[in-house]
Image (cartoon, rainbow, N blue to C red):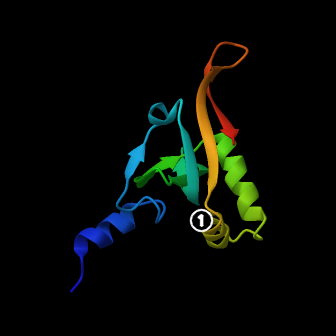
Amino acid sequence: MANFREIAAKTLSLSDLMAGREKMMTEDLIGQTVTCIEFDFATINDKGTEKTFPVLIFAEYPNHYYTGGTLLNKMCQAWAAEYDGDIAAASAALSDEGGVKIRFSAGKTKSGNNLTNIDVL
């Protein structure tokens, strides 16, 4: 028998990692150290321009996902590149190795705008 709820949730998610999980906001992570154990990418069409962003899962919050910005996108793109672009293989290897600890902190640009610092520990 088909599980229509599960099928709908998976179909409407931009990434399989999002399905059945609640979204975390940056504010939830400021000042925290978390362990990234899985990642994927999602693409949206924003006013005619395709934008790709990373979707991350943290060991400390297995029922949540986080959509990263520029810095985390660069990090995840580099991980995938190490596996010839095979995102699933890179994510599995990351998980097998126990993940990577990162710390989120609030910062400011030179012009005074807010930004989020990401430190790899």
Residue at the image point whose x is 52% and y is 30% from the top: 30
Task: Give the answer, above or below, for where 107 lies relative to 5.
Answer: above
Question: Where the N terminus falls, by quadrant?
Answer: bottom left
Q: Which image quadrant is residue 19 in?
A: bottom left
Residue at the image point whose x is 49% and y is 36% from the top: 29
The total of numbered circles placed on residues is: 1
Residue at the image point whose x is 40% and y is 47% from the top: 23
- Residue 92: x and y, percent? 61, 70
Task: Give the answer, above or below, for where 100 lies relative to 118.
Answer: below
Q: Residues within 10 Å of mark 1 (few under 14, many from 20)?
A: some
Question: From this viewpoint, which residue is outermost toward the left?
Answer: 1
Identified by mark 1, the residue type is Ser
- Residue 113: x and y, percent? 62, 17
The answer to whether residue 41 is visible is no
Query: What residue did someone put label 1 on?
Result: 95
Task: Give the answer, above or below, for where 86 lies relative to 49.
Answer: below
For mark 1, give the secondary structure.
helix
